[in-house]
Amino acid sequence: MPHPTGFAYETHPDGTVLITHHGRPATTLRADRATRFLAEVTTDPQLVMARWTGNYKRGNERTARNHPRNRH
């Protein structure tokens, strides 16, 4: 799977975190979710932001669909 790129995040004074992808808003995290995200984002920022926005299942769908266990 290719490594995700193009993600950025910004924190706001009210504790809200806005995650963008190529300059467009992808998701907004508030309260507890924002706190958990900020604690986790230090490991691998691009991968963490892709996972939190739901944009991490890209590139392997065709491979998974052709797997023998997934054929109908």
Image (cartoon, grey):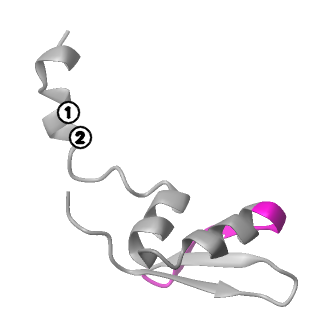
Rounded to the nearest angstrom, the CA distance separating label 1 from label 2 is: 5 Å
- The vertical placement of 12 against 42, above or below, is below
What amino acid type is highlighted by mark number 2? Glu
Image quarter hosting the N terminus: bottom left
SS at circle 1: helix
Residue hosting label 2: 61
Residue pictured at 19% horizontal, 28% vertical: 65
Amino acid type at mark 1: Ala
Contact between marks 1 and 2 (CB within 8 A): the answer is yes
Q: Which of 62/48 is in front?
A: 48
Looking at the rendered structure, the secondary structure element under dot 2 is helix
Quarter of the C terminus within the rendering: top left
Q: Residue at x 83, y 66 (%)?
A: 31
Magenta part of the chain: 22-32
Q: Position of residue 41 (x, y in %)?
A: 54, 75
Q: How many residues crowd mark 2 within 10 Å: few (<14), some (14–19), many (20+)?
A: few
According to the picture, the residue beneath numbered tag 1 turns out to be: 64
